Image (cartoon, grey):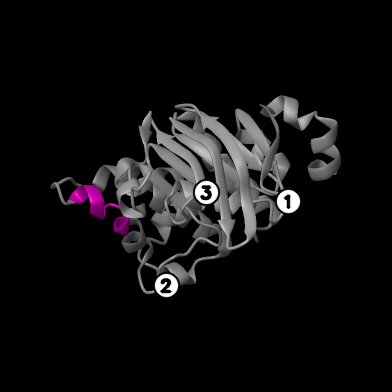
C-alpha cells in the first residue's frame, strides 16, 4: 500500500529524516516508535504532502506521490489525523465529520452510511452530534478527529500521537476503537510515544531515532526487544 524509499527531509541545515525506508502493506497497522524529536511527525507530514522531501520516493499502491499536492493525496485516499486533533471549533460534531466528505460527496454520494459507521464506532459522538466540537472532552475530541478521517473513506490512515494528553483509561478506550478499525482491514501507520499501546494494536513496527530507522520487526518481537524495553517500555 505505502512505500517510503530512502526519504531524507531537512529544515534548513537541520536533517530531520535520513534515508528512511519503510513499507505498510494493505490491511496492516504499522507503528512508528521513537522519542520526541526523532522525526516521526515529519515522516507523517511528508507522506501527506505537507513537507517536501529533499531526496527519496513515496509510493501509494505502486504509484509515485512525487509532486502531488496534499489535497490530491487526500483524494487518493490518504487521511491524516494530526497531533492535537485540530477540531474545527465553530462546527458541531456532525459538521466536523461532514467536512471530510466534501471530496467524494461532490459526485452526489450520501454520507448517511459513513455517519452511521462512525457513530457505531464512537457512540459518544452520536450522543453529542449537535454539540460544538470545542465543547467535547479531550478523549471525545480525539474520537472526533479519528471519526472525521474515517468519513473521508481512506485507503491509508495516518495517526499522530492519538493518546497524547489523554488519561490512561481514555487512551485505552481510543485504542480499543483503533483496534476495531484495524480488524476491519483499514491500513494504518501509527505514530505514538506510548509504545505499549501502539504495539498492542500494531502488526509490525519501526523504531526511529535521530531521523533514522534503527529497528524493524513484528510488534511482538519489538515488545520483547531489550533496546525497546529499556528505552520505551521502562
Secondary structure at badge 3 equals: helix
Query: Is residue 107 rendered to the left or right of residue 33?
Result: left
Query: Is residue 149 rendered to the left or right of residue 204?
Result: left
Span colored in magenta: 98-105
- Say whether marks 1 and 3 touch (CB < 8 Å): no
Q: Which residue is mark 2?
A: 89
In this view, 169 is above or below 84: above
Secondary structure at badge 2 equals: loop
Q: Nearer the viewer, residue 24 or 187?
A: 24
Residue 19 visible, this angle? yes
Q: Which residue is mark 1?
A: 35
Q: Which residue is mark 3?
A: 44
In this view, 33 is above or below 223: below
Badge 1 or badge 3: first in the primary sequence: 1
Point out the residue furthest to the bottom here: 90
Secondary structure at badge 1 equals: loop
Between circles 3 and 2, the one closer to the viewer is: 3
Between circles 1 and 2, the one closer to the viewer is: 1
Point out the residue furthest to the left here: 108
Quarter of the image with the N terminus in it: top left
Please say whether residue 103 is one of the residues in the magenta stretch: yes
Quarter of the image with the C terminus in it: top right
Amino acid at each position: 500500500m505505502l512505500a517510503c524509499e530512502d526519504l531524507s527531509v531537512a529544515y534548513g541545515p537541520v536533517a530531520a529524516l535520513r534515508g528512511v525506508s519503510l513499507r505498510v502493506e494493505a490491511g496492516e497497522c504499522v507503528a512508528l516508535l521513537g522519542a520526541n524529536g526523532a522525526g516521526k511527525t515529519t515522516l507523517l507530514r511528508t507522506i501527506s504532502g505537507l513537507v517536501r522531501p529533499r531526496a527519496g520516493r513515496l509510493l501509494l499502491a505502486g504509484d509515485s506521490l512525487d509532486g502531488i499536492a496534499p489535497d490530491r493525496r487526500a483524494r487518493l485516499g490518504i487521511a491524516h489525523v494530526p497531533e492535537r486533533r485540530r477540531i474545527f471549533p465553530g462546527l458541531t460534531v456532525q459538521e466536523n465529520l461532514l467536512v471530510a466528505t466534501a471530496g467524494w460527496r461532490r459526485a452526489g454520494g450520501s454520507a448517511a452510511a459513513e455517519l452511521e459507521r462512525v457513530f457505531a464506532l464512537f457512540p459518544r459522538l452520536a450522543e453529542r452530534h449537535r454539540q460544538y466540537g470545542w465543547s467535547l472532552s479531550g478523549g471525545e475530541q480525539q474520537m472526533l478527529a479519528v471519526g472525521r478521517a474515517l468519513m473521508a473513506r481512506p485507503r491509508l490512515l495516518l495517526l499522530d500521537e492519538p493518546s497524547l494528553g489523554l488519561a490512561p483509561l481514555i487512551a485505552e478506550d481510543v485504542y480499543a476503537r483503533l483496534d476495531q478499525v484495524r480488524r476491519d482491514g483499514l491500513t494504518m501507520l501509527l505514530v505514538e510515544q506510548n509504545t505499549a499501546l501502539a504495539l498492542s494494536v500494531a502488526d509490525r513496527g519501526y523504531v526511529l531515532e535521530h531521523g533514522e530507522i534503527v529497528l524493524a520487526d513484528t510488534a511482538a518481537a519489538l515488545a520483547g526487544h531489550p533496546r525497546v524495553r529499556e528505552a520505551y517500555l521502562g
